[in-house]
Amino acid sequence: MSTRLDAALELPRAGTPTEAARPFSLAAAFSELGVSNSDEWGWDNYERVIRHLIARFGARNLLEIGGGRAPMFDLPELSRMEVALTVNDISASELARLPAGYLTACFNVAGALPPEIKRSTYDLAFSQMVFEHVEDGRQAWRNLHAVLAPGGVAIAFIPTLFAFPFIINRLIPERIAKRIAEMLDRGRSDDTVPVFPARYSWSYSIERWMRPMLSELGYREVMLVPFYGHRYYQRFPVVRDVHAWFTALARRKDWRVFSSYTYIVVRK
């Protein structure tokens, strides 16, 4: 347990949404963003999406799942936005790399919630490239439902099955997957951006699967925003070109089984 966990429990009361924010649904909020279902848009706009959700839903208490050593917002930015951010990670050593001043909570989002973690507290929980690593997606989303305040929103940006690179990543031994990831992205290492085992539990953008599973946990709104394409074939010209052609077709037809990434967005 993080030595700074207790600090994360003393949060300001959830802000009262403005009159403009109160009637908004997830679909209405996303309609303002001009979403393009390409992988480039998903990556380039994720921070903008989080800021938009903060504004639209009047979020004041935020929880970043798996934020570790590199949370989305720095301390001056949090002060300017007048929000409280609690950074979660499963690893105390990752959280220990944070600058002093961050609220932290060290626990496994897919495990048993520690009793110290207050329920019905957070207005917005978000994560990026985290939920594909959890062992039990159902438990992770159940835990988020428990910690969200009524009306709170959670969003996870994840890679999805059944994109071919992620199928391979799921099937091959972890040590080989780690080596391939570090080879394809020279900037990744244990000291910079660690490679964690990927399990892909509940990592789909297929609505007829995900919507009933998440609704059964108690979420009143469920939205999936799929993205097509990835950059894993950039060094292989022929494969890259064939992939680009097929990606354009899948995106046009909205063949969710071939999406590469998705935003899973829910509201309690």
Image (tube, helix red, strand yellow):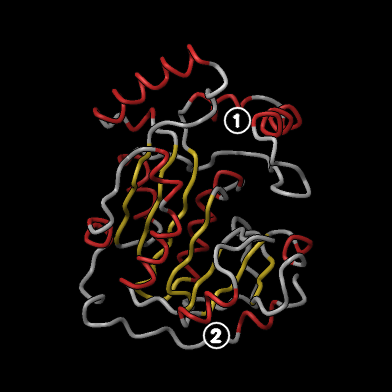
The quadrant of the image that shows the C terminus is bottom left
Q: Quadrant of residue 210?
A: top left
Q: Position of residue 169 (x, y in %)?
A: 61, 29
Indicate the quadrant containing the N terminus: top left, top right, bottom left or bottom right.
bottom right
Q: Which residue is mark 2?
A: 11
- CB under 8 Å between callouts 2 and 1? no
144 and 264: which one is in front? 264
Residue appearing at x 50%, y 72% in the figure: 62
Q: Where's residue 116, x and y in %?
A: 65, 78
> In the figure, 81 relative to 181: above or below?
below
Q: Is residue 235 left or right of residue 212?
A: right
> Residue at 30% across / 43% down in the picture?
36
| Residue that appears at 48% across and 65% down | 125
Tag 2 secondary structure: loop
State the mark number for residue 170: 1
Which of the two labelled residues, at mark 2 and mark 1, occupies the earlier sequence position?
Answer: 2
Mark 1 residue element: helix
Between residue 265 and residue 29, name the one nearer to us.
29
Structural distance between the alpha carbons of marks 2 and 1 = 38 Å
Amino acid on which disc 1 is placed: Arg
